[in-house]
Image (tube, rainbow, N blue to C red):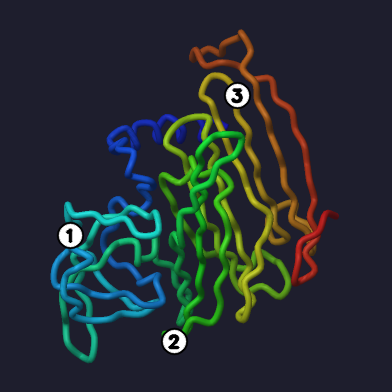
Amino acid sequence: MKTIILLCIALVASFYSFAQDKDVYIPLYTPLSGDQYVYADTAFVRSSPALNATINDTLFVGDNITITSNEKETSTIKGIWAQWSKVHYQKGGKFRDGYIWAGLLTFNPMRRGETQFVYGLERVIESKRDGVELKDYIIGLKVVVNKQKVASYKFKLEDSESARATMARVSTNKGLPNIKNIIALTFSGEACAIPTLTYRFGWTGEKLYQLPLETDMVDAGTVYYDEQFIFPSDKSGLADRIIMKIETGEATDKMDKKGNPIYKTTHERKVYKWDGYKVTPG
């Protein structure tokens, strides 16, 4: 739980520098760096950082590029705000340079052997509920094998305020039958009391299946909510089951020796059954 509180404090410090301009819908692409993959099925490489610049080349989903710099120019497409990046890449045996709109690139590159996992923002949907204007974010996950897209999955981010930072990782199947890898995509908010959401997907080698959503939230010094998943290969794991351990804490008036609040905690446990193709309560 202390780790969660420290993460909350770090997030506040990390995001303090982001511009609060109303046109900057989502800073997940700010800034990308280093080696990346193309997320879009088709991505144009332009002569300069602008949508009306000459198209010099075309890249495709899963193609490798290296970001050499992030430009000050930005563009908004389908409600997605992102910078332009100068990129270096190899094609046809030649090294080339150009500019790509960052919204066409994956947030984080993931790979296992010849299999690439790329994810990015598909689109922003503006809506209004109970008279309040909202923005929903549709995230896409694609699997690319030997330069061919073989599977994809789209989902809506449960809380758009969590769309400030993201990280991803690929693991083993953790003991789940019919699964080769588990992909975990985590989205975090810009401040305390904004949930951190982790979406997990099982990859069978042919298809993606969504696993239970993990939610964590902390309002430092007040309350916290922590979900922890236990898979079959984990300690205390059960065959064909995903166990969710939930801990909720509420600060009391008492303090420990270091001046930190003492929390009153409650615990809950949920169990899901995995039959190789779907998750059901059990």
Query: Which residue shows up at 38% across the image and 51% down it?
Result: 28
Q: Quadrant of the C terminus?
A: bottom right
Q: Quadrant of the N terminus?
A: top right
Relative depth, front residue between 147 and 49: 49
Which residue is tagged 1?
Answer: 69
Mark before the other along the chain sequence, 2 or 1: 1
Secondary structure of the residue carrying tag 1 is strand
Query: Which residue shows up at 22% across the image and 77% down it?
Result: 89
Image height check: is 209 above or below 217? below
Query: Which residue shows up at 71% across the image and 75% down it?
Result: 178
Relative depth, front residue between 75 and 72: 75
Amino acid type of the residue tagged 2 in the rendering: Asn
Image height check: is 168 above or below 178? above
In the picture provided, is 245 more to the left or to the right than 251?
Answer: right
Which residue is tagged 2?
Answer: 146
Dot 1, how many residues are within 10 Å of its Cα: few (below 14), some (14-19), or many (20+)?
Answer: some
Dot 3, how many residues are within 10 Å of its Cα: few (below 14), some (14-19), or many (20+)?
Answer: some
Disc 2 to disc 1, C-alpha distance? 28 Å
Disc 1 to disc 3, C-alpha distance? 41 Å
Secondary structure of the residue carrying tag 2 is loop
Which residue is tagged 3?
Answer: 223
Q: Quadrant of residue 205?
A: bottom right
